[in-house]
Amino acid sequence: MSLQEKLDARKRTFEAGAPPETLAVMHRATDDLLNSGIMERILKAGERAPGFTLPNQRGQMVRSSELLARGALVLSFYRGVW
């Protein structure tokens, strides 16, 4: 099963059990994002990301240019604690 098939199955399972008002909010938010034009502004596969400075897991500011000078750079995004 492909990743997209797994994601589609998970979405169907979630939507089958979620309250209609919750689904309405989620679908409206998704539509708002799609209508915002964000998809035309995101990086495509193979494109280079612009330079940036972000805090690391210890809160220290880190520049992408400094990390790239040491070798390949892999970014991992996590939402933290909600």
Image (spheres, grey):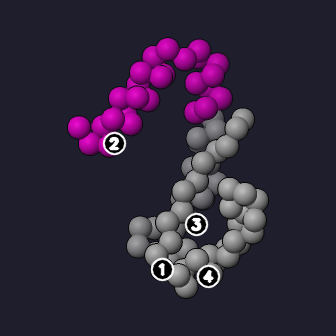
Circles 2 and 3 in contact, beta carbons < 8 Å: no
Name the spot of residue 79 as percent of width and height, x first.
Answer: 64, 45
In the drawing, does residue 77 fall left or right of residue 17? right
Callout 3, which amino acid?
Arg
Which disc number belongs to residue 65?
Answer: 4
Q: Residue at x 72, y 57 (%)?
A: 58
- Quarter of the image for the N terminus: give it: top left
Q: Nearer the viewer, mark 1 or mark 4?
A: 1
Q: Give the secondary structure at mark 4.
A: helix
Q: Give the secondary structure at mark 1.
A: loop
Which disc number belongs to residue 61?
Answer: none
Q: Residue at x 32, y 43 (%)?
A: 3
Mark 2 and mark 3: Cα distance apart in space:
22 Å
Q: Nearer the viewer, mark 2 or mark 1?
A: 1
Mark 1 and mark 4: Cα distance apart in space:
10 Å
Q: Give the secondary structure at mark 2.
A: helix
Mark 2 and mark 1: Cα distance apart in space:
31 Å
N-terminal label among 1 and 3: 3
Instruction: Give the quarter of the image for residue 49.
Output: bottom right
Q: Nearer the viewer, mark 2 or mark 4?
A: 4
Callout 4, which amino acid?
Ser
Residue segment shown in magenta: 1-27
In the drawing, does residue 7 fall left or right of residue 25? left
* Residue labelled with disc 3: 41
Mark 1 and mark 3: Cα distance apart in space:
27 Å
N-terminal label among 2 and 3: 2
Q: Can residue 40 be spotted in the picture?
A: no
> Eyeballing the image, is 57 above or below 14?
below
